[in-house]
Image (cartoon, helix red, strand yellow):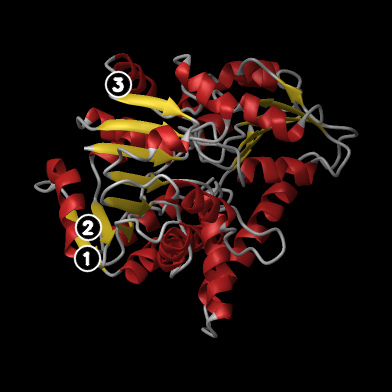
Amino acid sequence: MKITVIGTGYVGLPTGVGLAELGNDVVCLDIDENKINTLKSGKVTIFEEGLEELFKKNTENGKVRFSTSFAESIPQADLVILAVGTPPNPITKEADMKYIKAAAESLAHHLQGYTVIAVKSTVPVNTGTAVENIVRQVNPTAEFDVISLPEFLREGFAVQDFFNPDRIIVGANTQRARDLIAELYAPFKDKSTILYVSRQSSETIKYASNAFLAMKIQYINEMADFCETSGADIYEVAKGMGLDSRIGAKFLVPGPGYGGFCFPKDTNAMAYMGKFNGVDLSLIETTIKSNERRKINMAKRILDMVDDVKNPTIAVLGSAFKGGTDDCRESPALQIIEIMLAHDVQIRLYDPQAMDNTKAILKDMITYCNSAYEAIGGADVLAVLTDWPEFKELDLSRIKQLMKRPQIADYRNTFDCTEAKNLGFEIKSLGRKL
């Protein structure tokens, strides 16, 4: 199948490379010339485990190509996938549809023969209808269907999730479009559920799923706070909860708050849609507010550990919103850092993959280090804010030797508390017995 993927970000690039690996001829299209030139030179523009290897294989064999030209990329496509950004409006927090609308208008000029246009970006309900209207207005004779094909790729695990989807949702209103998608996903028919629904239902499923997961994260974070005051252990509590098949074990890990580009954006957009449609979505609205308070509280907890130190140095491990990705958008770690910077502190940071993205955001406001141990050197407190596996391998004895004061704010529950206490650390964690 000939496929054009519009957008080469955290969704578009893994999707394009994955579809090429399945044997399709793929063009990844983007209006960002610098990004496309980088991809053409053989360099991936995002970090995802396993992506670089697949990228290299499928660019070398010619199964995936890169372009900035709609005229060259659209006419031969059987399927066009929209994977462009839908960033939040800075005031209303609703999803900004300008990139979707621009892509729809641009591709409409070049459609030839029957084409399925699949909206993979996370979009408000009835976006498919809006895209359909735009294309029809620009090109009244075009033969096409617009479907909703939401993505469920976890950042850091996008390649794994692409090839092992737990479900594939297809919002298609015609049998012809459904047949094409059935052909596309034939390799997954025996190992994944493919659910065909209406376009509006498909668009809602994505938002409903992300909002529910955000609520689950905030819930376990609140339970972690309760455990700290009651003497319970959050991991024992989470394990007991997760054994209930109605609840499940996933997303029951405490942390400094949810972040990334999807959960904050999608919960805010869902709350806006609720207000727009006159529906009370108070659970989602409360989750949003509670998550913001949590990051403020995490920053306060760290600052409280050095409130007796003049101009303290804080070592921070992690700036990506979670381990496995270089994405710093809406990262709890960065938001906590920004809160702390309002006080008289010095911050030394290390992240295995996200340093460049962090520098683009924080500029020269902090000190950037080349290793975890370099960041820790001379610190009054160590704050662990991203769950990178390599942080678990750090030597606590060496950490103690490097620090001015043996204090750890372990807000990813990275270290063994008993070992840390035996070495003389004051350690704060989330929801664990100390």
Q: Where does label 2 land, which residue?
A: 177
Specify the label residue 92 is tagged with.
Answer: none
Q: Secondary structure at mark 1?
A: loop
x and y percent of residue 42 in the render? 44, 15
Q: Secondary structure at mark 2?
A: helix
Q: CA distance from mark 1 to mark 2?
A: 6 Å
Q: Residues within 10 Å of mark 1 (few under 14, many from 20)?
A: few
Q: Where does label 1 land, which residue?
A: 174
Ranked by sequence position, the earlier of labels 3 and 1 is 3
Q: CA distance from mark 3 to mark 2?
A: 27 Å
> Which quadrant: the N terminus?
top left
Ranked by sequence position, the earlier of labels 3 and 2 is 3
x and y percent of residue 407 in the render? 68, 33
Q: Residue furthest bottom?
A: 278
Amino acid, disc 2: Ala
Amino acid, disc 3: Asn
Above or below, 89 against 4 in this view is below
Amino acid, disc 1: Thr
239 relative position to 127: left or right = left
The residue nearer to you, when weighing 315 against 280, is 280
432 relative position to 383: left or right = left
Q: Where does label 3 land, which residue?
A: 58
User: Taking the image as drawn, is residue 26 in sight?
Assistant: yes
